[in-house]
């Protein structure tokens, strides 16, 4: 008996379902498959560039912000009206990732604050994440969402977004080896929080040691 191949089984099931689609749906499916392939190639190329940059360094510590969400403090800089903070799957540009949802309040910023300790043997510290606005948001004109990251009260990174595509980032931090760290994820509707469906995909703090 041939070995069971779950990948082939999945492909066969997909092919059977494709046969029932209309011509218009087949055109849309072809476009979507091309988009997914492009996304895979993009993310793989980013990982390869990072591996080249980390030549001679080994990952020795990792802090996953989604796994530690229950330990985080949630707050609003003004009033929390319409603020939504949680963890769950989020789709941006038709690409789904596990994410921190952080819709800002009507006024001011939404804050998700983590307190953590960086091990003493870390030589290099990097923060990786992707920022996005979930599919279906109807942001346009002057309606922008601000994304900000603060470390020990100092702004480390910021941007504004209106599109629903994921934007992937890798940000260098001071080593902060052996230190307690306060890291804050913040979003702000900049006076118009409508459709600010802000999400942070798979945020992680990575510690490396030189071999």
Image (cartoon, rainbow, N blue to C red):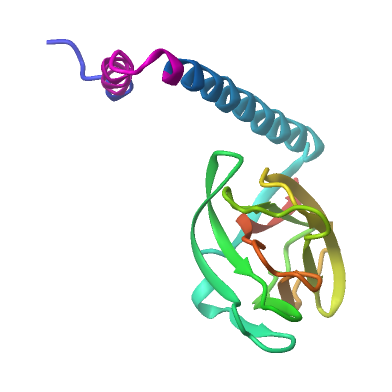
Question: Which is more toward the observer, 23 or 161?
Answer: 23
One can see residue 141 in this view: yes
Q: Is residue 210 visible?
A: no
Question: Residue at horizontal 75%, vertical 74%?
Answer: 178
Left or right of residue 127: residue 92: left
Point 28% across, 20% down: residue: 17
Does the segment drawn in magenta span residue 39? Answer: no
Residue 36: image x %, image y %?
56, 27
Quarter assignment of residue 55: top right
Please tell me in which quadrant of the rendered image residue 26 appears: top left
In depth, the one of 60 and 149 nearer the eye is: 149
| Residue furthest to the bottom | 79
Q: Quick one: quadrant of the N terminus?
A: top left
172 left or right of 166 in image: right
- Left/right placement of residue 132 relative to residue 53 reads left
Image height check: is 39 above or below 75?
above
Q: Does 66 appear above or below 117?
A: above
Q: Position of residue 98 (x, y in %)?
A: 51, 53
Q: Is residue 124 above or below residue 49?
A: below
The C terminus sits in image quarter: top right
Q: Where residue 54 sits: x, y (%)?
A: 77, 40
* Residue nearest the viewer, comparing 67 with 81: 81
Question: Residue 166, position in %: x, y?
Answer: 67, 45
Q: Main secondary structure of the magenta part?
A: helix
Quarter of the figure with residue 114: bottom right
**Which of these two is toward me, 127 or 160?**
160
Residue bounds of the magenta highlight: 8-25
């Amino acid at each position: 008996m041939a070995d069971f191949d779950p990948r082939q089984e999945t492909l066969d099931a997909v092919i059977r379902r494709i046969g029932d689609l209309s011509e218009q749906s087949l055109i849309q499916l072809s476009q979507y498959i091309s988009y997914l392939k492009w996304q895979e190639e993009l993310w793989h190329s980013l990982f390869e560039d990072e591996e080249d940059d980390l030549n001679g360094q080994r990952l020795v510590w990792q802090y996953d912000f989604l796994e530690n969400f229950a330990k985080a403090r949630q707050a609003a800089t003004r009033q929390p009206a319409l603020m939504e903070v949680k963890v769950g799957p989020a789709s941006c540009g038709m690409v789904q990732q596990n994410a921190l949802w952080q819709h800002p309040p009507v006024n001011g910023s939404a804050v998700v604050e983590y307190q953590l300790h960086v091990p003493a043997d870390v030589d290099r510290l990097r923060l990786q994440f992707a920022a996005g606005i979930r599919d279906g948001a109807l942001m346009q004109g002057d309606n922008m969402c601000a994304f900000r990251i603060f470390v020990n009260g100092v702004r480390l990174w910021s941007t504004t977004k209106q599109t629903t595509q994921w934007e992937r980032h890798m940000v260098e931090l001071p080593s902060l080896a052996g230190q307690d760290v306060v890291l804050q994820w913040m979003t702000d509707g900049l006076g118009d929080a409508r459709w600010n469906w802000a999400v942070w995909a798979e945020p992680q703090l990575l510690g490396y040691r030189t071999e």
